[in-house]
Amino acid sequence: MNTTPPRKPRPAILFVLGATIGAYSTLCGIGGGVFAVPLLHFLYGFPMRTAVANSLLLVSASTTTATLLELMRSDSALRFDVTAALVAGSTIGSLLGFAVGKRVAPIALKALFAAILLAVAAHLLVDDDARGAFSSTALHYTSTPESLLHIAVIGFVAGIVAPLFGIGGGLVSVPGLLAWTSGLGFLAARACSMAMSVFTSWQSVWMYRRSGQYGPETSLWLPIGAAAGAVVGIQLVHIEAVTRSARGFVAFALVFAAARFLWDVGVALRERSRS
């Protein structure tokens, strides 16, 4: 257990870190919590659940800003049918994930999730179909009741991990959409995932706030920076040359997330062996 008193973050540093996380996560279609949680926990000494709660505000700021800007673009890739199915599944999943997080020490879940993330990252880097999905900027996807049910399942799983691990769910939904929805393409998968994360992250913030584990004074500059970074990220992701590099960005985020969860597992096992 981390017993070090939390360090008081400097606003300017938090703003820059938040902006960097916001820009990168917007490019990938993830919320950014996978970077914010270890930052707050390991660097600033926040208790894990407090770090998770505060990182969710960063996720809320970056995804809300990115989604609003996406809606304003004439070349918006947002699909409302896909987003609605994701939100329907994730809303239920978030409630389950929050309940599980209060009752279960998620060591085994983190180990399993890390293994899945590494497998997905490897798939994105070597599979020809994944390469085609990332290079596709046009929308060729036609929704059916069956495909929307599949998307709702993706949203449900993404919703579970959002409050459990302090992430927006994009680590699940972006690869899931690319693998399970032929013709959707990366830009649409990213846009719909960000829109879903608006709902999952704000819902999770509300649940943590209601339980008294969220301190706005510690997290204000981080989400402000994340919102600013999302403005930059949404402009970059619609540049074709940047989109072609998105597969590497997403794969790195998955590997980073897996490494962080495995680190958590290792720390927990060492503490358990000492007790």
Image (cartoon, rainbow, N blue to C red):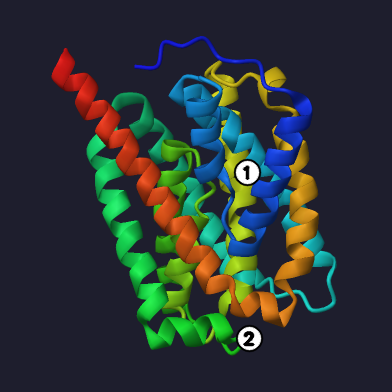
- Dot 1 falls on a residue whose secondary structure is helix
Q: Which residue is mark 2?
A: 139
Image quadrant assignment for residue 202: top right
- Left or right: residue 69 compared with residue 185: right
Compared with residue 201, is residue 149 higher up or lower down, i.e. above or below? Answer: below
Q: Earlier in the sequence, mark 2 or mark 1?
A: 1
Q: Quadrant of residue 246?
A: bottom right
Which of label 2 and label 1 is nearer to you?
A: 1
- The reply to whether residue 105 is in sight is no
The one nearer the camera, 168 or 247, is 247
**Number of residues whose C-alpha sits closer than 10 Å to that of mark 2, classed few (under 14), some (14–19) or many (20 or more):** some
User: Label 2 amino acid?
Assistant: Leu
Q: Quadrant of residue 184?
A: bottom right
Question: Disc 1 residue type?
Answer: Val
Residue 59, labelled with which disc? 1
Task: Judge by depth and name the residue closer to the eye, 169 or 10.
Answer: 10
Q: Position of residue 248 (x, y in %)?
A: 51, 70
**Screen quadrant of the N terminus:** top left
Mark 2 lies on a secondary structure that is loop
The tag on residue 179 is none
Q: Is residue 201 left or right of residue 111?
A: right
User: Is 248 situated above or below 209?
Assistant: below
Q: Nearer the viewer, residue 103 or 269?
A: 269
